[in-house]
Amino acid sequence: MRILLVEDDEQVAEGVMAALTAAGFIVERTGDGEDAWFRGETENYAAAILDLGLPGLDGLSVLRRWRAAGQRLPVLILTARGDWSERVEGIDAGADDYLPKPFRLEELLARLRALVRRAAGQAVAVLVNGQLTLDTRRMSVSLDGAPVHLSPQEYRLVSYLMQHAGRVVSQLELTEQLYAQDFERDSNSVEVLVGRVRRKLGTALIQTRRGFGYLIEATGDD
């Protein structure tokens, strides 16, 4: 899933990007408030990590503009500010969570995964669909209790469809969530990826809705 990281501190940004990438996310980063506002308005992200202390257009202003425009993407605020009233202001402006600096990357990942799950209507970290189990913390997939090796891209596909089980996801949405903006991809990249996953997990798992997209049926299992 694609994450927007808005952080002007190079050292902090590099550490966060490395951790998110290792956790299976696609990360796009900017340190400019105006650019962040534009990207959040025009691109489809699973969530945004937003620093408040940005030069120029500050993080709270970016957040307020997003919410005023009806942008509902989950937002996790990063702040070095110790004033509790500013944290409250961020939540009131529409943030879904906040994390004060300095922070542990493990906590950042846990909070981000929780935001993404809640946005998709999922409450737990381990998703079960029939004989398929996906652990979002360990980035692992098992079928009938046996682990299945998936490439990072294959895992992202299964994870996204599992978290949106019961909903047909368009090819465009999958493309936006599975590939970085500057990634060179063919028009049939998603179709090829789905084919690879079907060979590993069975042809019945991911259904095709011609002209609409792809679907993993919701089984009702927890």
Image (cartoon, rainbow, N blue to C red):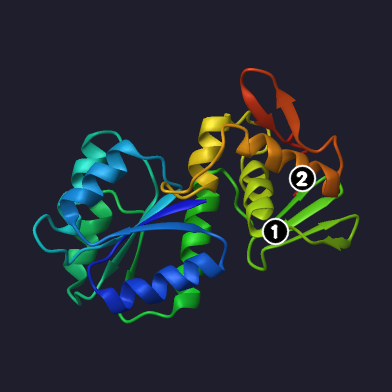
In this rendering, the answer to whether 183 lies above or below 113 is above
Viewer-nearest residue: 170 or 76? 170
- Amino acid type, mark 2: Arg
Residue 17 percent across, percent down from the top left? 42, 68
**Residue lying furthest left in this view?**
56
Q: Report the side of 114 relative to 3 (left or right).
A: right
Please tell me the numbered disc located at residue 151: 1
> Separation of disc 1 and disc 2 at Cα?
10 Å
Residue 26 percent across, percent down from the top left? 49, 56
Q: Report the side of 40 relative to 34 (left or right).
A: right
**Residue shown at 61% from the left, 46% from the top:** 160
Whether residue 63 can be seen here: no
**Residue shown at 47% from the left, 74% from the top:** 107
- CB atoms at circles 1 and 2 under 8 Å apart? yes
Please tell me the numbered disc located at residue 196: 2
Residue 83 percent across, percent down from the top left? 17, 74
Q: Report the side of 118 relative to 103 (left or right).
A: right
Query: Splitting the image into 4 quarters, where does residue 68 fall?
Result: top left
- Amino acid type, mark 1: Ser
Q: Report the side of 24 relative to 130 (left or right).
A: left
Residue 174 percent across, percent down from the top left? 56, 38
**Residue shown at 68% from the left, 19% from the top:** 210
**Residue shown at 62% from the left, 52% from the top:** 156
Viewer-nearest residue: 114 or 28? 28
